[in-house]
Image (spheres, rainbow, N blue to C red):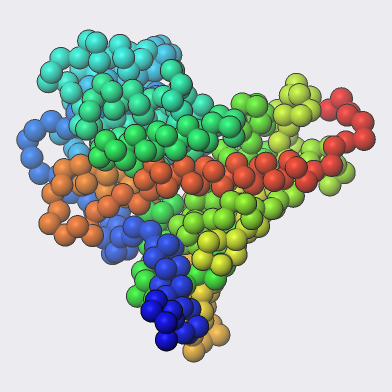
């Protein structure tokens, strides 16, 4: 046999190991993901200084969803938490949320918080004792993920506070597709800085997701296919910007990003050139909606969002992925599922946002196991793991890790844009544009 040559079986074995390595993502033992009410505050008397960027719902909660980063930081850090600054150009709103916090048992975390319009203003007025250990970014995505002044919060953080840890909400940006290259430049800058950075793809931290990951790794499985579905209850979405692609980047980029990311988490790198997609548009007969709470006639026809987007792609491993996003349901509850197939196995994760249920079919049985996780809180788990990594308190390197780096998040962002672009290329324009 010539030097360096291999039998076909040997090549296949090597290719299989390469595909396995390519599809691996950081994982956590699901037993380590404990509920927030069972977690204990990190011991210590020193303050843990934090800067919050954004005074909106993501950071301080709302009735629309379970997000509320401040709540999780309070429970993880206890009296050590000191929010040294809140950055938001809406000074009145920021001041109001701080006043509400100071009326509660977490007053000590906020009683000395100062409000600034920009991160630069805080840096100019910062006392040495106020240097943050972490900067938590929950501002709108159109103001981050680029190298452009005013839309470069990550680069600002690294410039003003070298080495300080970052948490960045997802999607990492919502600019035009031409700016994706800028997001990757930001990712490289973060990687080169060696600063801790976590992106808020909290579904990766679900116990059910990590249970799937554990089974795949323990059985040395190679994922064959991922099938994702996300059906929105559109009646409850009263924010006009969400319905306007020029402002929100559309439902795939802004909302479907979680399921595109979960698909990548299991399937590995996507061959972006293979992405194909079709859409049901607002002007088509099947795309008429009867219970919208916004006046879509005020949105330019070319900026109105599709009702259905269906996409398929190939992973670099050879596996196949698909995602369908629906703007179709009424009421309030969404309907979301992710299926993963590997040799002999089927995993189906249902309702991951509210009451996750995991169904598993294994070799040797035609029946599905059912696993429920009633007290799971992936928002807390991602915050808890971030802080543990910052504090570097665990001797076991697998006990706490970042599950979504900025570069990884860029690749999920790239996939969502590829789906949107492919769907727009395949759509048929209306014969005549109706007024509404």
State the image quarter where residue 239 is shown.
top right
Q: Residue 419, position in %: x, y?
A: 64, 46
**Which image quarter is the N terminus in?**
bottom left
On screen, 77 above or below 132?
below
Judged from this view, the residue extending furthest toward the bottom is 364
Question: Which residue sits at x=42%, y=34%?
Answer: 185
Judged from this view, the residue extending furthest toward the left is 45
Q: Residue 404, position in %: x, y?
A: 38, 48
Asked whether, in this view, residue 318 is left or right of residue 104, the answer is right
Seen from the viewer's position, the closer of residues 114 and 274 is 274
Judged from this view, the residue extending furthest toward the front is 2
Question: Which residue sits at x=30%, y=11%?
Answer: 121
Q: How many marks?
A: 0
On screen, 33 above or below 79?
below
Asked whether, in this view, residue 112 is left or right of residue 208, the answer is left
Question: Which residue sits at x=19%, y=37%?
Answer: 78
Seen from the viewer's position, the closer of residues 387 and 144 is 144
Q: Residue 402, position in %: x, y?
A: 31, 49
Q: Residue 223, position in %: x, y?
A: 50, 69
Residue 193: in sight, yes or no? Answer: yes
Residue 337: in sight, yes or no? Answer: no
State the image quarter where residue 416 is shown.
top right
Question: Which residue sits at x=22%, y=10%?
Answer: 125
**Which image quarter is the C terminus in?**
top right
On screen, 200 above or below 19?
above
């Amino acid at each position: 046999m010539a030097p360096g040559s291999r039998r076909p079986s040997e090549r296949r074995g090597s290719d299989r190991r390469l595909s396995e390595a390519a599809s691996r993502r950081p994982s956590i033992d699901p037993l380590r993901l404990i509920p927030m009410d069972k977690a204990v505050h990190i011991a210590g008397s020193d303050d843990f200084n934090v800067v919050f960027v954004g005074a909106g719902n993501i950071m301080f909660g709302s009735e629309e969803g379970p997000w509320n980063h401040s709540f999780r930081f309070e429970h993880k850090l206890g009296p050590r938490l000191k929010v040294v600054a809140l950055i938001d150009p809406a000074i009145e709103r920021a001041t109001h949320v701080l006043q509400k916090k100071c009326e509660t048992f977490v007053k000590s975390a906020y009683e000395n918080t100062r409000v600034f319009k920009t991160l630069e203003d805080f840096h100019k007025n910062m006392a040495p004792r106020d240097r943050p250990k972490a900067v938590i970014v929950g501002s709108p995505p159109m103001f981050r993920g680029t190298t452009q002044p005013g839309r470069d919060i990550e680069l600002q953080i690294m410039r003003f506070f070298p080495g300080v840890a970052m948490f960045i909400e997802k999607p990492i940006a919502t600019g035009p597709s031409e700016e994706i290259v800028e997001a990757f430049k930001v990712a490289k800058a973060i990687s080169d800085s060696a600063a801790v950075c976590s992106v808020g793809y909290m579904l990766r931290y679900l116990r059910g997701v990590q249970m799937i990951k554990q089974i795949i790794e323990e059985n040395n499985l190679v994922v064959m296919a991922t099938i994702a579905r996300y059906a929105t209850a559109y009646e409850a979405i009263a924010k006009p910007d969400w319905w306007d692609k020029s402002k929100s980047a559309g439902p795939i980029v802004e909302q479907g990003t979680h399921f595109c990311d979960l698909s990548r988490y299991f399937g590995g790198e996507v061959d972006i050139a293979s992405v194909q997609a079709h859409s049901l548009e607002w002007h088509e007969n099947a795309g008429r909606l009867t219970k919208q709470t916004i006046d879509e006639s005020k949105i330019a026809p070319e900026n109105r969002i599709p009702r259905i987007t269906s996409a398929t792609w190939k992973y670099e491993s050879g596996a196949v992925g698909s995602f369908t996003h629906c703007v179709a349901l009424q009421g309030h509850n969404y309907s979301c599922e992710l299926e993963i197939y590997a040799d002999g196995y089927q995993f189906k994760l249902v309702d991951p946002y509210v009451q996750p249920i995991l169904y598993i079919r294994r070799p040797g049985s035609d029946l599905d196991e059912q696993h429920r996780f009633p007290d799971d809180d992936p928002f807390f788990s991602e915050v808890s793991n971030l802080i543990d990594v910052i504090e570097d308190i665990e001797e076991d390197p697998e006990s706490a890790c970042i599950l979504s780096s900025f570069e990884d998040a860029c690749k999920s962002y790239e996939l969502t844009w590829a789906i949107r672009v492919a769907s727009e290329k395949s759509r048929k324009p209306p014969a005549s544009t109706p007024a509404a």
